[in-house]
Image (cartoon, rainbow, N blue to C red):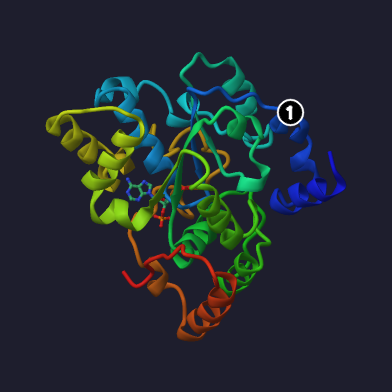
Amino acid sequence: LQEVQVKEINAVLLTKGMSDNWESIWNFQAKPNDLLIASYPKSGTTWTQEIVDMIQNDGDVRKCQRAYTYVRQPHLEWKPWLLSTPGLEEAEKMPSPRTMKTHLPVQLLPPSFWKENTKIIYVARNAKDVAVSYYHLSRAMSVLPRPGTLDEFIDKFMNGRVLWGSWYDHVKGWWNKKDKHPILYLFYEDMKENPKQEIQKILKFLEKDLSEEIINKIIYHTSFDIMKQNPMAGYDTIHINIIDHSISSFMRKGITGDWKNHFTVSQSEKFDEHYKKKMAGTTLTFRSEI
Ligand code: A3P
């Protein structure tokens, strides 16, 4: 590994220990018929995973609920500190076609994904809502670094000093890659506003056709309220020692614009000013006023 890459991995994964199995992640062998769901944390990953799972199972809820989504769709780089088996080993054991998930920034994705032209669905969400959701998860999840106050957390978020690194670089990096690779770039805000349209985009991307009735069933079963009741989707039991649901649950609010209930006017102004600089020159735009 080059020194510069090691530095980057340690910055994104925050501590040296977490990048211990980096060699095996970097050398992971993707296949052309794999599907990867990629995102910055708290952007609607689990929701997208659930939608994809239901699409792959033709809307058959029983098949989708037989196991936790993340067991069926392993988190490529999950480490033993989070679960007993690293997602990487799960992914290697899986029969094809495989669906996996990752939070890696684009420059750290194992190169075999590019070489094999593997399809990737990327989901992004506006920065302030991600920051709020990430703050609450960090409060509840003891394996994440302590967030401090919201003000302190916002500062860390703006400076990329959180697990998985800079949100700005993450969303821009994947955006820039999407014209050179089969990447479907989705937005949480669009999924909230028009789930049918976004599901249809996924269907087209996966070259699948489902009836109107099945699509409606998928919309229903992947709505926030129904997913919240589903312990398989909401990490309710498996993370019992890791997420303290009495502090904040994984399926927390599931809305757009919750940042307005959290950010003060001055925090928001400071954030916006910094945001403009970080996002200058990109064609990528987010809706944060909804
Ligand atoms: P909030 O904390 O704002 O409620 P990820 O899966 O990437 O970690 O994202 C988690 C966020 O997505 C949480 O946001 C969670 O509530 C929200 N979410 C999960 N399922 C959802 C759904 N079906 N509809 C809307 N939001 C959902």
Residue 88, placed above or below residue 260: above
Residue occupying image coordinates x 23% and y 47%: 197
| Residue 139 visible in the snapshot | no
Q: Tell me where residue 260 appears, x and y as whole percent.
A: 39, 74
Q: Amino acid at mark 1?
A: Ser
Residue 5, placed above or below residue 99: below
Residue occupying image coordinates x 35% and y 31%: 206
Residue occupying image coordinates x 62% and y 35%: 78
Q: Given the current orientation, which residue lies at the most extreme right position?
A: 3
Residue occupying image coordinates x 37% and y 42%: 47
Residue 177, placed above or below residue 36: below
| Residue 41 visible in the snapshot | yes
| Residue closest to the eye, 17 or 271 | 271
| Residue closest to the eye, 67 or 201 | 201
Q: Tell me where residue 183 appears, x and y as whole percent.
A: 46, 42
Residue 152: name its quadrant. Answer: bottom right
Of helix, strand and loop, which one carries label 1? helix
- In screen coordinates, is 52 left or right of 159? left
- In screen coordinates, is 183 left or right of 192? right
Q: Tell me where residue 23 appears, x and y as whole percent.
A: 77, 32
Q: Tell me where residue 163 appears, x and y as whole percent.
A: 65, 52
Q: Report which residue position mark 1 lands on.
A: 24
